[in-house]
Amino acid sequence: MKKILSPKEAAKKVKNGMSVMVGGFMVVGSPNTLIDALVEEGTNDLTLIVNDTGFPDSGVGKLVAADQLKKVIVSHIGTNKITGEKMNNKEIEVELVPQGTLAEQIRAGGAGLGGVLTPTGVGTVVQEGKRVINVDGQDYILATPLRADVALLKAHKADLAGNLVFRRSARNFNPLMATAADLVIVEVEEILEIGEIDPDEVVTPGIFVDYLVKKGGAA
Amino acid sequence: MKKILSPKEAAKKVKNGMSVMVGGFMVVGSPNTLIDALVEEGTNDLTLIVNDTGFPDSGVGKLVAADQLKKVIVSHIGTNKITGEKMNNKEIEVELVPQGTLAEQIRAGGAGLGGVLTPTGVGTVVQEGKRVINVDGQDYILATPLRADVALLKAHKADLAGNLVFRRSARNFNPLMATAADLVIVEVEEILEIGEIDPDEVVTPGIFVDYLVKKGGAA
Amino acid sequence: MDKQQKRNMIARRVAREFKDGDVVNLGIGMPTLVANFIDGDKKVILQSENGFLGVGPAPEPGQEDPDVVNAGGQPVSILTGGACFDSATSFGIIRGGHVDATVLGALEVDEEGNLANWMIPGKLVPGMGGAMDLVVGAQKVIIATEHCNKKGEPKILRKCKLPLTATKEVDLIVTELAVIEVTLSGLLLREVAEDSSIAEVQEKTEAELIIPDDVGVLK
Amino acid sequence: MDKQQKRNMIARRVAREFKDGDVVNLGIGMPTLVANFIDGDKKVILQSENGFLGVGPAPEPGQEDPDVVNAGGQPVSILTGGACFDSATSFGIIRGGHVDATVLGALEVDEEGNLANWMIPGKLVPGMGGAMDLVVGAQKVIIATEHCNKKGEPKILRKCKLPLTATKEVDLIVTELAVIEVTLSGLLLREVAEDSSIAEVQEKTEAELIIPDDVGVLK
């Protein structure tokens, strides 16, 4: 039986200076209740690992606007001009990673791999500072694993064993991040009894999940 | 709309000397109708990529017994003593690979990766002849991608778009192999109309599948 | 021709490149327009890198599903027979060569097939998102772009000056003036617009074009 | 004590190592027995590397589900709250450290925590299956073995002579005579069986044991 936290209790699990993975793609599949609670809490100096920085007034964009971030590891910041401004003013360090590489780095972090070899970015600035490994005559960039202290995720439904199912394009990075953080907190639309999700339909097994939070739940 | 083949038509797609991935774990999730048709066809000189060689009289064990294999890349042959005998008599070349490494090699083959770094097997005979790459002070073995000419798989249900769902422990290597072969033939219990499998429940998207075969179907 | 007419013309021509059964990923911006011109007789499956296959048209206003957006964040639909997946699977599909064609815009493209479309030094860098993976992974990379930039300068160069998105991956360039194929010998002029001329295309192209005897008409 | 009594005694003691909420993978053979002795008050989740979490007891004869077997191919059940997945995910769970403990047999184990349990040169090699991944990946590696081999020779050695399964990964050794912890300083004798003695355990152990003041009683 997973413990259900209020958004405020969940946000308090995130401490200043932690690395935090947040699911979502342009705020679809983003744990907005958890983000709002984290903004409320004012936790700062965070390193965020996320696909994109959302919009100035929604998703993880709120953490950008509230100056809670030290660094962002991200594939795209183009939808949030505040991230770009803060990057140019050196208020936030931004590390840009190709989206597919970011996905594999998080998966590797969760799957105990020392890294993966990807052809993406070979011959571009992405290659700078990376190890290049040749296999059968082709160059690949060694993408090393990424892990975080906490993952804040969004699923459609969970059962009380913590098993998760996702909906449509809201799945994106959420199942990957569930495997790659020391503490995994998941915001869900609905919490079901154990047995209400068939084992074949589970996308993220409950062993990856530490706490559940109801979307829009009382603080 | 995917084309539905008879087992015999499907078996004829496999040519002498090809590399063939076959799903299944100790014959659970094994495409037995396709294997029977391939035995009937007598295709030989095959390189098989498979978790285990089944039993002497079932699963891919039938291909072993019928002398259709040149080589097997496999994690375990202990349940089929004929494989061991043929290995010792040098009638079959056997390449043993840790099961998790085999899974990652097939996934890498399907996902366009040049390989993955795994800690499994470091300091053992598995390391012999492999590249060892150190990341942050830890040694890893570079496991290179595996692909095959054909994959013979077993799913529970397919729709006519080729989308697949699997059942219980019969899933195992099947979804991975679907991504890593030039031609993918899937034996299924049931073929549904397009729309009868919800997009969220699809495990293997239909784009990976070339042909469907009904389990136990007429030759 | 006004800007919209040019864009539609390019999109219409690009759409003719697809074959029945192709899996296609359309980039953000002008490439998205291509979907409007795909021949209804051809079954083309659109992939959206945020996590699904079977992109369908935008829903009627008010009918949007917040969990169903394309990679540009715009509301779309998922056709029956579609399938949803996480970001690692999505980029496994892309990087693994399971996408037959991708259509992307360009800042610069050159005679070696190098592409620059993600950053301009000194300007705000939005990030590469999934573009680097798409260019490396898709079987065929089609660039859909106006022939010249806003200043009237050629975008089709001998050598890209801007930071690259990928090296030697572009296969075809479609503009409002011409269709140009990237070959090992250089840029081969395939088609010239009805209201243009070989001379005009060459004049507006920095790289030297190979002019075959049978240059077609771009309509 | 006959062989079965020894096995049960070892299994019973191993089961006491688990904490509430632990995810445990039990190897084939004697380790499987451990499931019979897990305290009902503790919620221990069993993982089966062929692809699911929530291994339940064997069904009544005639009630077996052909798609539900454990990693040894024996019919089992899946408890409510369980989850099924493919082999890459399964070994991602294992290699990624999400399995709290694994229990495996041994041919040899040594004072550095090296383990040999997969091959004897000159004999038929069954293959390592998932054992190498389990030993490297699980947080705690427990060896459940009879103290001596069939010839009465020690299995707990100064240095393994057989080909290794993994290096320096074993944490605890449980036999019918003793419980021995692998520490950086060497093998620490934790418990001795009621009907044995420290002297007997040391005599039957090739490696020198560290004997603390508070050796417990193994029951």
Image: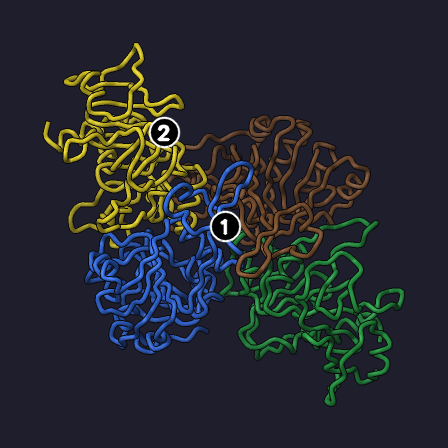
Chain colours: A brown, B blue, C green, D yellow
Which residue is situated farthest in the right direction here? C151
Tag 2, which secondary structure? loop
* Numbered circle sitting on residue D135: none
In the rendered structure, the residue with mark 1 lies on which chain? Answer: B
Q: Amino acid at mark 2?
A: Glu
Vertical placement of residue D167 versus B4, above or below: above
Q: Position of residue A72 (x, y in %)?
A: 68, 40
* Residue assigned mark 2: D112
Q: Amino acid at mark 1?
A: Val
Classify residue B39 as left or right of residue A164.
left
Q: Are marks 2 and 1 in contact (CB under 8 Å)?
A: no
Q: Position of residue D112 (x, y in %)?
A: 36, 29
Disc 1: CA contacts within 10 A as few (<14), some (14-19) or many (>=20)? many
Which one is nearer the viewer's eye here, D15 or A189?
Answer: D15
Classify residue A2 as left or right of residue C55.
left
Which one is nearer the viewer's eye here, B142 or D66?
Answer: B142
* Numbered circle sitting on residue B116: 1
Vertical placement of residue D200 versus B174, above or below: above
In the rendered structure, the residue with mark 2 lies on which chain? Answer: D
Q: Position of residue A203 (x, y in %)?
A: 45, 48
